[in-house]
Image (cartoon, rainbow, N blue to C red):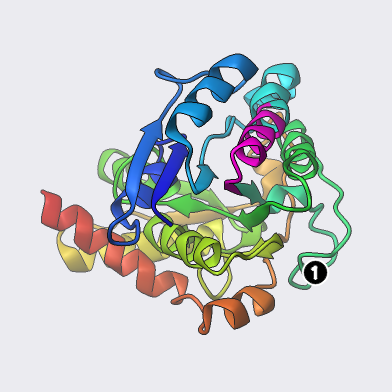
Amino acid sequence: MKTALIVGGKGQLGRGLAATAPAGTRIVSHDVDTLDITDRSAVDAVVAAVRPDVLLNAAAYTAVDKAESDEAAALAVNATAVGILAEAARAVGAGFVHVSTDFVFDGAAGIPYAPDAPTNPLSAYGRTKRAGELAAGDDALIVRTAWVYAPTGGNFVRTMLRLMAERPEVRVVADQIGTPTYAPDLAVALWTMAGKNARGLHHYTDSGAASWYDFAVAIQEEALAAGLLDKAVPVLPIATADYPTPAKRPFYSVLDKSSTNALLGAPAPHWRANLRRMIAAIRAEG
């Protein structure tokens, strides 16, 4: 590919995509401050001017709880805009890559969800992301992921590091099971799949599974070992019922990556190994 257009360019994944682009790729990146992806005429004008070989959508309305009271806004970004981007990509013959979420599932299966497993989102966020998958179309590459984190930006890892440094203890939900995903590796996977002209639904996360509590315990252990935290604090497991939120979340949302692993030629690193990489990156950046 010669030219790639990234929307959502200032987010964790957007930055990862720009940083890991194949050699020789011309990158044009936009975020909400330079392109309103819900504005069809604006999107059409940018895509017509750039004429990308691939358009990668890393933009999303990700305020899961806020979406419960503002579903229309979430739908505009997570679904309507996806259709606009997909149509604009088709108009110039570009491939379209869209990123979705494990929240399209209800978590009742108890086994990893295959890409063709029935969806049943429990929240407004999940419903709007599922609508976005449908809006992307059958000719798009749609990759579901989960629990994304990176050395920069707002994410669970950075939140836990801050809370562990500020508080005498932290309480973390232990009955929601999923898999963290290191944004730079997700970006590389998206470039690889796009380069192979993959289409349809795929799943990508780090390997393994964990609860939020497991993840938090590992964050503290790795941060202590790297010298990012001065002392350990108690990490206490709690039930979802003890931490009520407006949006209902799936209790089990591990994704089956078998088809993606075959496409990429190898499974992703384990989430604990990638967590260690992120902690090392934060330490290196000071």
Nearer the observer, 117 or 87: 87
Pinpoint residue 32: horizontal percent, then vertical percent.
46, 22
Residue 66 appears in the rendering:
yes
Q: Position of residue 271 (x, y in %)?
A: 45, 70
Q: Is residue 61 magenta?
A: no
Per the image, label 1 sits on a secondary structure element best described as loop
Label 1 packing within 10 angstroms: few (<14), some (14-19), many (20+)? few
Q: Image height check: is 222 above or below 32?
A: below
172 lies above or below 113: above
Left or right: where does residue 103 sit relative to residue 168?
right
Residue lying at 83% horizontally and 65% vertically, measured from the top left: 116
Q: Is residue 236 above or below residue 117?
A: above
- Which residue is under mark 1? 110
Name the image quarter holding residue 130.
Answer: top right
Is residue 228 shown to the viewer in this render?
Answer: no
Q: What residue appears at the point 52 percent right and 21 percent down from the top-left corner?
A: 45
Q: Is residue 28 above or below residue 286?
A: above
Q: Quadrant of residue 22?
A: bottom left
At 50% from the left and 60% from the top, the residue drawn is 190
User: Relative to 284, is 113 on the left or the right?
Assistant: right
Q: Please identify the dominant SS of the magenta region.
A: helix
Q: Is residue 89 in the magenta section?
A: yes
Choose between 37 and 64: the one closer to the eye: 37
Q: Tag count in the figure?
A: 1
The percent coordinates of residue 75 (x first, y second) are 73, 25
**Residue in view at x 52 percent, y 45 percent:** 56
Q: Position of residue 29 (x, y in %)?
A: 38, 35
Residue type, label 1: Gly
Image quadrant for the N terminus?
A: bottom left
Residue bounds of the magenta highlight: 81-95
